[in-house]
Image (cartoon, helix red, strand yellow):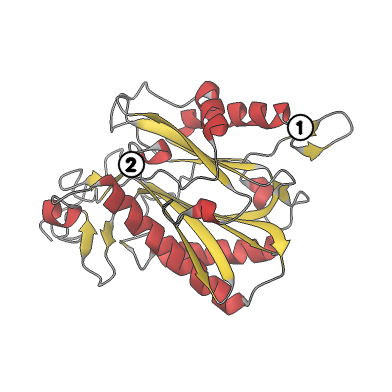
Amino acid sequence: MTPENTTLTAVPGFQVGHWTDPVGQTGCTVILCPPEGAVASASFLGPSPGTREGVLLAPEKKVERIHALLLTGGSAFGLAAATGVMRVLEERGIGHITPFARVPLVPAAVIYDLGSGDPQARPGDAQGEAAARAASPAPVPRGRVGAGTGATAGKYLGGVGAVPGGLGSVSLTRQGVQVGALAVVNPIGDVLDEQGGVLAGPGVGPGAVAFTPGDVENTTLIAVVTEHTLTKAACRRLADAAQAALGGVIRPSHTDWDGDAAFVLSAATRPPADPLLLVTLVQEAVQGAVRDAVRQANPGPDRPGALSGA
């Protein structure tokens, strides 16, 4: 029996593909939208988010639909992988119609993972192309894959007690309303379980020792998708709600050393949903995807809680 798909790709029309470098400890992940694109917006918090086409997603900007979303390691170097995704979409005749060409719109966001493995190992356009070609509606592979390969969590002691953060994904359906979420978990703070205990990280809490930030950068990336029709402004409000949800699963969150990004994509193929139910599902899915990332990246008896002393 084929197992039920409980990841982002359970939402019809969206596909996910990874490129993974397990030696260099980096990778990239592509979410392909339906061919006609998805209405999208985003929320960026923290002092140093690394993005491409991020301004395009502001509600007041003209273009509403994007054709893919890239989440990648490699810091700002990794943004080059979006070029490979565009190549695949152009080849398939997908893109925003202009007088002389279809232009695929591929926003992107990065995590800083250069200290996890080889700092010279970075996704580029060939790797973005590979991830796009690997995209499928199958259940999303999770853990230390794609953009989550070099992600780590709980770094406020300067790396002591930090554990793999990974990539996670869930989908939720309630009263006929469905959302899917994917998270790349690379925060400075601890990740909390459903009871508020420490799932990943040192677990002693900030202030236990003097904190010297150094040059370590941290980012959690969130993507939420739904079929339900949303305006671009509504996508932005849900992206803000997704950011708020991080505060319930990462402690501390949205610090001076986090550059968190949350994207919301609507295929707009189903009628609008109850807005209160929708925001509830988005926030539950975001928190579930963050916890799933850590659990999938740290399987077996030596879960992060045991490693952190929690």
Residue at the disc numbered 2: 151
In the structure shown, which secondary structural element does the residue marked by tag 1 occupy?
Answer: loop
User: What crowding class fits label 2: few (fewer than 14 Cα within 10 Å), some (14-19), or many (20 or more)?
Assistant: many
Q: Looking at the rendered structure, which numbered label has been put on residue 93?
A: 1
Q: Please, is residue 91 above or below residue 237 in the view?
A: above
Q: Decide if residue 246 is on the left or right side of residue 106.
A: left
Question: Residue at coordinates 45% horizontally, 46% vertically from top-left?
Answer: 140
Q: Decide if residue 114 is on the left or right side of residue 98.
A: left
Question: Residue at coordinates 85% horizontally, 36% vertically from top-left?
Answer: 98
Is mark 1 in CB contact (under 8 Å) with mark 2? Answer: no
Rendering quarter of residue 158: top left
Closer-to-camera residue (304/44): 304
Q: Position of residue 120 (x, y in %)?
A: 36, 21
Q: Decide if residue 78 is on the left or right side of residue 227.
A: left
In the structure shown, which secondary structural element does the residue marked by tag 2 occupy?
Answer: loop
Q: Amino acid at mark 1?
A: Gly
